[in-house]
Image (spheres, rainbow, N blue to C red):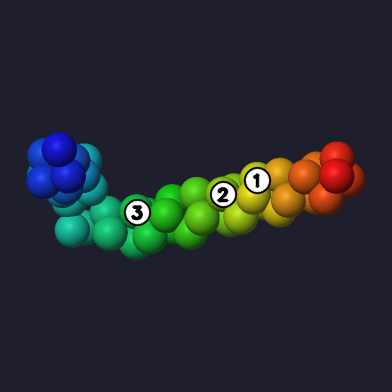
Amino acid sequence: MGVKLEVFRRELWPPEKEGQRQELEEFKERIRKQREEKLLRAARQGS
């Protein structure tokens, strides 16, 4: 599964688009952190 996904990502993001891919990865990471923080706050308030 993992290998197939990596091949798919290579096709989706050829080397010349590496900068764009990096930006997208950073964006997704920010969103994920925000979501985690929101969940943590909700959990603290709920307890």
User: What's under tag 3, amino acid-wise?
Assistant: Arg
Q: Secondary structure at mark 1?
A: helix
| Spatial separation of the CA atoms under disc 3 and disc 2 | 16 Å
Neighbourhood count class around disc 3 (C-alpha, 10 Å): few under 14, some 14–19, many 20 upward:
some
- Residue located 37% across and 54% down the image: 20
Across and down, in percent, residue 33 comes to 61, 55
Q: Residue 27, relative to residue 5: is it above or below?
A: below
Q: Secondary structure at mark 2?
A: helix
Mark 3 or 2 closer to N-term?
Answer: 3
User: What's under tag 2, amino acid-wise?
Assistant: Arg
- Residue located 38% across and 60% down the image: 22
Residue pushed farthest front? Answer: 47
- Residue located 51% across and 55% down the image: 29
Q: Residue 31, relative to residue 8: is it above or below?
A: below
Where is mark 2, residue-wise? Answer: 32
Instruction: Pick whichever, 41 or 6, lies toward us.
Output: 41
Neighbourhood count class around disc 1 (C-alpha, 10 Å): few under 14, some 14–19, many 20 upward:
few
For the N terminus, the quadrant is top left
- Residue located 78% across and 45% down the image: 43
Cβ–Cβ below 8 Å for labels 2 and 1? Answer: yes
Where is mark 1, residue-wise? Answer: 35
Cβ–Cβ below 8 Å for labels 3 and 2? Answer: no
Q: Residue 22, relative to residue 45: is it above or below?
A: below
Across and down, in percent, residue 16 comes to 21, 58
Where is mark 3, residue-wise? Answer: 21
Determine whether, in the image, residue 1 is placed left or right of residue 41. Answer: left
| Spatial separation of the CA atoms under disc 2 and disc 1 | 5 Å
Across and down, in percent, residue 32 comes to 56, 49
